[in-house]
Each structure stands twice: as structure tokens, then as C-alpha cells.
Amino acid sequence: MMRKILLRSLMVCLLVALCAGAYMGWRSLGIFQTAYGGFQHLRYLLESGETLEGVPVDDVLSDNYLLSLFGDNPELVERLKTVVDLGMATDANLKLGNVSVMIVTYRKGEDNKIFDAAIYAVGGFPDPKSKRLGFHSTGYFREEVDSDLWISGNSLMNLFGRDIIVFCEQDKAEAHMALLYDMLNGGILPLAQRIVEAPVHYAIVFPDPKELAPPNLRNSLQTVIIKGEMTADTGKTELMLVSPSAVAAYQVFTITKDLRKLASITFHDKFSGYVKEMSWGKMNDVWWAVEYSQLLDSMQLLQDQVLVVAKTEYDRTKNNAILKTVERAGRDIAMQKSFLLAGDLPWEFAYRDKDNPSGGYWSQEHRWGSEWPLGEEGIQTPGSIAAAAERERLRIQAEQEAARAAELKRTGAENAQPPAATPTPAQSI
């Protein structure tokens, strides 16, 4: 009897193990197909030099589409309609273009009113003088991505088109163009300054992500929207993946969850994104990988009918990691642009910045570490000022405690000394 019970128990355990192994194998196969298929598709797009077709401007910048994206914020929709109408009236040829990525930015004042709304439309527009954006083949991303992806300076930016059209208020046009120029040349301080002055809200919309999606997700994605807010000391981001059905959304949810875990492992293991316990103490030598790893681990992922939503919040250090990533991308774009526009070779571009402390790779203003561009080594923020004040308070407190301890020690030493003997007068006999 005991033998039968034991055999049945073993069979049940074996069946459970086989089911769990089959489930994990299915998920592993899904993430492998997604990663490998996306890699092959991306390599084909880069090597062939193709550009995403995009969606016609009239559809992406229409009132109905903006309302579908930002219906929960009517004030923002009205602001965006105004700047779009102004841009279309300025140049009617813009209606003939296609948009592959739309970046919406705005800020809020103390009274919570929206101001400085703008749309950066990336795609193809009827401008024969335009040149594609691209990361240079010897830049940072060339070192981090498989070498087969890089041929003759083609880059991820090539996929989105050759133009960036800015729709904004007329009196803000010069400021936005200057900001765009600085970012495309690796200058991140102007954006950091704007963030400190007033929180920057943003939304990145891929109207037709099917052209970029891996083959096994191509029919499961309709729209990809990234919304977020970056302040001087905090930030938050929300990723929304829209699917045509709940079944397709579950597939997207499962694969996105696995990809998040894979990305976290990559930052943790490949880039040493963890605080190391050394014999002399803790060492955080790859701080940006640590921040990205923590950012991914803290991300909340959920499915709601046809939506897959990922949310995360972060601090100033993670803001700096993100801004420095944008800075790296801008420097790579600048290196490629210097060759396309001026005919300079990459080493000539670097030679012009030979006196740069980073050897010409980073921007002139760049500083290492997690306190730049927002922080004590860059633009001061309320958090960095408060942290500096707290460190100064603790330093003064430690000095005062040390002084009191020294005074107590000195007083104690004086009290411990025996009293001096006093002579007694001699008695007469």
C-alpha cells in the first residue's frame, strides 16, 4: 500500500514538473522568437537603409487623433491644436509628409496651467535638403550593439526618417530649435535647465509600431505610447501598449514581462549593475547600470483588457542616467552629422575636441558620476541643495560633539587629580 502511494506521489510530482517545464519552455521560446526575430528584422531595416513609412500627417495630427491620445487633458489638446494649425498655415507642404514618431512636450506653471506645448514630428517631409539622422559607426552604441547592425553609419535613428518638424507657439520657436540643436549635438544642460525651471511632461507616440515590432508581435500591437514627467528630483514614466484584442494583449503582456526580466539581468550581469561587497567596503563603480537595473526591477506591469501598461517612478540619480544616455546619443548623431554636412572624418570631429577632458567623446560640459547634469556638479536642484545642507548640518554636529567630548575629557582629567596637601602649623609644647 505504501508503495502504491509513493508511486502515485512520484507520478504526480513528475507530471507537475513536466507541466512547469513545458510552460517555462513555452515562455522561453516566445522570448527567444521575439528577441531573435526583432534582431533580424532590425538588422534588415538597417542594412537595407529603409525608412519607416509612417502615417500621414493629416491622420497623426488630426483633432480626433490628438483627442484619442490626450482626451483626459482637454487643455493640452486645445494647445496642441493651436500649434498644429499655426504650423500647417505657415507651410502647407507639411501636409504631404509622414510621421513615424511624435514627441509631445509641455510644462505646467505654479497654477497648474499648461504652457510651452510643442510637437516634435519625426518622419519624412518634402524637403530635398534634409539629411537622415544617424549614430556614427564608431560611437557608443556601435560598441554596445552587435557589429552586424552597423554598416556605413546607418543607425536606429535612420528608421524614423530624415526630418524633425517642430510645431510650437510662435514666440517659443527659437527656444525649441535651440534646444533641439543642442540635444542633437550632445548638449544636455539646456534640457536639464528647463527641467529645473518647471517639470517637463512628455509623450512619445508610435502611430504604427508594426514596422518596428518583431514578427510574432506585429499583429498584436496597434499603438505604442510612452507618457512621463521629469522634475528636478523625481520622474515617472508610463508605457502603454495597445492591442486589437484581449488575447493579443495577454501575449504582449507575457513577452513584455519576460523582456523586462531579460533587460534587468543584462544590466545586472553584463554591465555589472550591482553594488559590490569588497574587502574595503561597498563599491558602486557602474552606477548608471545599477540605476537602470533598479528602474526595471521597480517597474509595475499589468494588463487591462486590450491595454498592457508598465509604470515606474524614479529619483534624481535615475534622471541623470537617462539624461546621460540622451547625451551619448546626441554626440553620436553630431559625429555622423559632421561627416554628412561638413565632410569631416570621425577623427577630425574628435580632433576639434581634443582638449575636451573626455577626449572628445562626451560634450565639453560633461561630468562623470551621478551628480550631473542635475545635482551638485551641474544644475542645482532643491533636492541637491537640501542634501548639501544636511551634510553640512551633520558635519557641524559632528564637530560640536567632538568638541564637547574633548571638553568633557579635559574636565574629567582635572577633577581626577588629587587635591594639593596644605601645611599644618607646628604645635608648641
Image: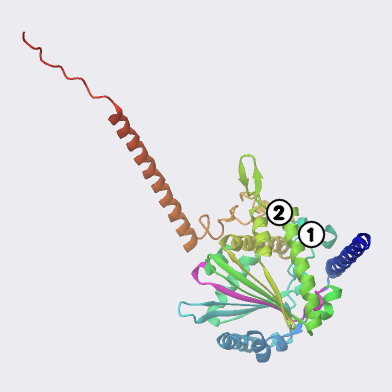
Q: Amino acid at mark 1?
A: Val
Between the residue at mark 2 and the residue at mark 1, the CA separation in whole angstroms equals: 24 Å
| Vertical order, 164 against 11 (above or below) | below
Give the residue at x 22% y 22%.
Answer: 420
Q: Residues within 10 Å of mark 1 (few under 14, many from 20)?
A: few
Disc 2: which residue: 348
In percent of width and height, residue 42 lies at 83, 68
Badge 2 marks a residue whose secondary structure is helix
Q: Which of the 4 image quadrants contains residue 31?
A: bottom right
Taking the magenta stretch, the answer to whether it contains residue 209 is: yes
Which image quarter is the C terminus in? top left
**Which residue reaches farthest front?**
1
Identity of the residue drawn at 45% across and 59% down: 386
Asked if the residue under mark 1 is in contact with the one under mark 2, i.e. CB atoms within 8 Å, the reply is: no
Query: Is residue 26 in view from this perspective?
Result: yes
> x, y (%) of residue 260?
74, 66
Tell me which numbered mark, 2 or 1, is placed earlier along the sequence.
Answer: 1
The answer to which of 89 and 105 lies nearer the viewer is 105
Q: Which residues are magenta?
A: 196-213
Indicate left or right for 135 with 219 as reference. Answer: left
Q: Secondary structure at mark 1?
A: loop
The extreme bottom residue here reads 64
Q: State the residue position of label 1.
A: 145
Which residue is at 64% across, 63% downward? 322
